[in-house]
Amino acid sequence: MLAIETFDQRQGGNVLYKALSHPLAAEALSALAARLRPLAPIALLDPDGIAPALLALAPALPPIAEVYVEDVRAIGREIAGCAACPLTDLPRSAARALLITAFDAERLKARLAPFMPAGMECLSLDAIRLPREMLTVPERYGERRNFATNFAFFRDQDGLSTRLVSANYWAGYGAGAVRLWLRLFAADGEVLATWEEALPAGPGGFAIDSRAVRARFGLPPFTGQLFLHVIGAAGHDVVKYALDTFPTDAGPSLSCTHDANAWPSERYAGLPAPREDERVILWVQNSHAVAIPAGAIALDRMGAERPVAFPRPIAPFATEALDVATLLPGIRWPAQIELRAGRHVVRPRYEVVRGGRTRIAHVNVERADLAPDPTLRALPAPLGRGFLLPFPILPRRRFATIVQPTPMATSETSLPLRLDLFDPEGRPAGSHFLGCLARDHALALDLDSVLAPDALPEGGHGELVYDFRDGGEGNGWLHALFRYADRESGHEAESSFGSHIFNTLMTYRDEPQSYSGKPPGLSTRLFLRLGEGGRQSFTCLIYPASAPWHPRSTTSLLLHDEAGALVAEAPLAIACSGSALIHPQDVFGPDRLARAGSRGYVLIRDTTCRLFGYHGLMDAAGGFSLDHMFGF
């Protein structure tokens, strides 16, 4: 396990982790280690408690001989293999150099100067700071907006290309000039290219196309990862995007995934086992400048507790295509696979290869900080049905819909679930108790098995909810994988996400979740990218309600061009507990979409209720993609 603290659900991300793991900081750490080695023995002052993370991410640092702490409660604690000494012992140190594991440390260095032994050199993590021009808030290095970063799976190889799409949503929070610092890593972890791109001055859309990057830098075919650093961010430090994988050789494949969730986790879940005629490839992408040791990555059949380790090391920032059958032969869908990642990677992608087609989706963070919540057995009446996990049912004449609940907490041993179905107007279309599922369950419910052939011909949506009639426990972190199959072309797409409490004035803990401010979150701001290269975008918008809410939504579809200017607006009213399947070309017409351009987008806005959405693309070859949307 990599000794780093990355993300806490209560406090958010650890910005010091991002400051240490940034690719440029990693290079500077190597230089700092080279500078310190001739000065051994080394003493360490750890005012912020980040020494374990520093040593994990900078193994080239010389051994630490002494550790000093300011907090009297930390005296005697083992840090970096040493018993921590009080800082008042510093004058008697035998070390030749003191490393302060903190940024913005000049005042601290000045305070210590009278107490340092003669000849002792004092250094701090200011030696690995990013250049000033890369900082959004230069005067406060630990400010979150200085490290608005993320990774993306990025490929231009074997007839498949990738296109990352988002918008300068920071402009809506008052940002001035915003630009991207980008670094592309090859499969072996070597740097292929480093460059910057300016974003539109307003809330305009932008795209990074692997074909354009490859042509710009004269690159060979590649499959690796793209590191993004947003400079000039305002409002928040989260970097969100949609990533399309599409064929460049007239092939039939098409898929999309959500952003990578920039925080490495100990475990991930929601990885499907292959069917007999499939290969499932897990793309393991090292998120750090230190190698992943042999055996540190492992796969396990969910609930088996018999992990099988990957036997080879993975180089810094490298990408490894791991065929799950090599570690877990014989395991077949609908079994699920758990990834033991040891905090070495951000949310990985997996690829399913079947019948000449390939599709890509992502696993999700399996939380280790959750315990069963007995309150969920009898939530107060104002919360209605409580936690809901909504998902689209695509038009059944063409598409099959398959639902697979996925355990998403290490403590989760049961999933007591019910499936509620609704037509587009919010009318109930059936309810099915799925049982109290075990952690190692193998349920994948094809809705064809519970719906009449003529039911929901134009689709609708379903909601997974807790149902404790047969016992079991819940934690509010309910997840599921949703798989869709085109009955005509055979193409498939899949997405996974988690539950929330939706559209009620009453709150429970941090629900209904709000992306800005305190709960309840009762408004919508969703991003829908437009199609490109003959592919047309679509979205399924769902109006879930834990308790009765407004009879219909008051939704606006706002078409923006590449500069962020409004091209057109269209109203939309979705019934409570209903849904709508939207194709921008049908709403706005080809002329307005042409004015918006390939980097334009639709902003889905509603100030009266929280909508939940899934988006995708469709092409003429029967390919389609689907994943959950993001808001800002």
Image (cartoon, rainbow, N blue to C red):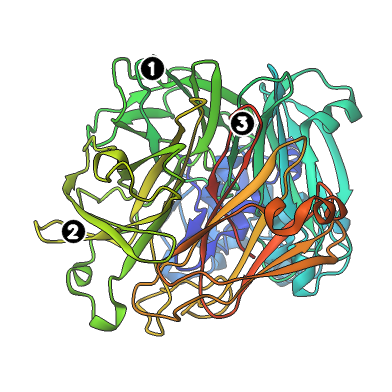
Which label belongs to residue 325?
1
Outermost residue on the left side: it is: 470
Dot placed on the residue nearer the N-terminal end, 1 or 3: 3
Which label belongs to residue 473?
2
Residue 337 appears in which quarter of the rendering? top left
Q: Mark 1 vs mark 3: give the one in front.
A: 3
Dot placed on the residue nearer the N-terminal end, 3 or 2: 3
Gap in angstroms between the C-alphas marked 1 and 2: 32 Å
Above or below: residue 160 compared with residue 382: above
Gap in angstroms between the C-alphas marked 3 and 2: 38 Å
Image-based side of 206 in relation to 582, left or right = right
Say which amino acid is labelled 3: Leu
Residue 142 is at least partly visible in this image: no
Count residues near mark 1 (Cα–Cα under 10 Å), then give few for <14, some for 14-19, many for 20+: some
Image-based side of 89 in relation to 382, left or right = right
Count residues near mark 3 (Cα–Cα under 10 Å), then give few for <14, some for 14-19, many for 20+: many
Image-based side of 365 in relation to 227, left or right = left
Q: Quadrant of the C terminus?
A: bottom right
Which label belongs to residue 254?
3
Residue 544 appears in which quarter of the rendering? bottom left
